[in-house]
Amino acid sequence: MKILLLNQTFYPDNLATSQQVADLAVFLTQRGHQVSVVTGQRAYEERQIKFSPYEKWQGIEIYRVASTGFGKKRLRYRIVDSATFFISLVWKLMFFPEQDLVISFTSPPLIGALGALFTWLKGGRSVQWLMDINPDAAFQVGYLNRKSLLGRVLNFIFEATLKNASEVIVLDRWMKHRVIEHGAPKERVIIVPPWSVFKENELDVEKAIEEFKREHHLENKFIVLYSGNHSVVHPLDTLLEAAKALRNQQEVVFLFIGAGLRTKDVAEFKEKNQLSNIIQLPLQPREKVKASFGSADLHCVVMGPGMSGLVHTSKIYSVLASGKPFVFVGPNQSHVSDLVRVNSLGAVVESGQAGLLAATILETQKLSLEAKEHIRNVSHSIVRNYAPAINLSCFYQNVIQEGLPNEAETYPLSSEPVTDEG
């Protein structure tokens, strides 16, 4: 079967979605399918980095198209980068050969419309694999007005792609509910959770962690880590207010690692309140990611109010792989809250409850070695249920295998992980 994957970021870029799309591509190639990927030529975060226009990697043909490289410092820059990528992608697909199956992801938003249009014109099946729900997320954070002409047009396009997809892949039950509300046929919606970009025990790199702490003067500190995209859908206000409340706790530091629109908000809050317990670092080089992520004594996972079912914070799976304690700042009804309740692991603090978050941090600081070991064991037992081979087999059986009888058992993934900030 000829299969085409569409996503703005792919190997060797260092985002979680790059890893997961790469895992899917390798998985399908190992099954004997002819896999092609059309993606962006520029690195998603470090836009000045450009990859080769064509590469063959592990049997996968990778075609990278051009775009502008303004970056994510301003919303208008992101729009221009996405628009120029779309134009290049349209041009590439015009001359791309017919495929049996086109799987479209959600970077940039509504890329699935191009995948659906491609199959409508040239044949084959269109599958929508939704990492988030747009334009709803843009409506929720105020980027777009749902009732405006543009909002109605984008919503119409999104719903049309859902209704005409052979299958719609979502990441959790809350997302499933959202897409069914948008008209996706219930029987075509399949839940395939993402997975950790780290392997279990891969973060046991004590020497590298010690060197990372020493480099940034974090020895003998209790590190509360937020690592990842600083975006409006992951508001950091509650975490920042907790840092302010704990400013006199000399052992506790709040480490923010990553990039995005809201990095400047963290810097401004730190300066305005003269907080020495906040440390900001940029995205770490790939060789240092495991050490930076593993340095946490407490991971902080964030989701904005009203975002449940619109975004899926996949960082939680890497947090589980780390075996470290975590606190979720977000809505009580979400995939992370479900995980906390079912497994009696971690803590949930709703946005705005900075005092409760500060208290949770201090309680975590007092955990015994036995309690930390229990958290580690439970976390690793959970993350095994989200192994790539398990989740990808679910996708394969529901989307591809019915048309290909007598398939062999799942092959293990052999691709090296492309790590990211989680």
Image: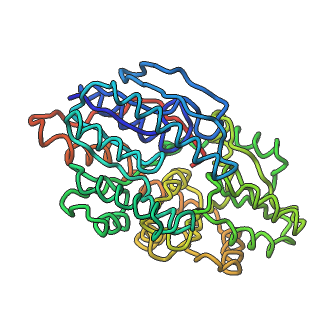
Residue found at the very far left of the displayed protein: 405
In the rendered image of this protein, does residue 179 appear above or below residue 414? Answer: below
**92 or 171, nearer to the observer:** 92
Position of 254 compared to 401: left or right?
A: right
Image colouring: rainbow
Q: Quadrant of residue 37?
A: top left
Relative height, residue 75 to residue 83 (above, below) = below
| Image quarter of residue 266 | bottom right
Q: Residue at x 56, y 37 (%)?
A: 14
Image mark count: 0
Q: Which residue is drawn at the image coordinates 48% and 27% (left, top)?
A: 64
| x, y percent for residue 276 | 88, 61
The quarter holding residue 264 reads bottom right
- Please provide percent x and percent y for residue 365: 71, 68
176, 27: nearer the viewer: 176
Quadrant including the N terminus = top left
Q: Nearer the viewer, residue 132 or 358?
A: 132
* Apparent side of residue 134 relative to residue 421 in the rendered image (left or right): left
Using residue 270 as the reference point, say whether residue 308 is left or right of it.
left
The residue positioned farthest toward the right in the image shown: 274
Q: Is residue 128 above or below residue 98?
A: below
Q: Residue at x 12, y 35 (%)?
A: 404
- The extreme front residue here reads 149
Residue 6 location (% of width, % of height): 39, 37
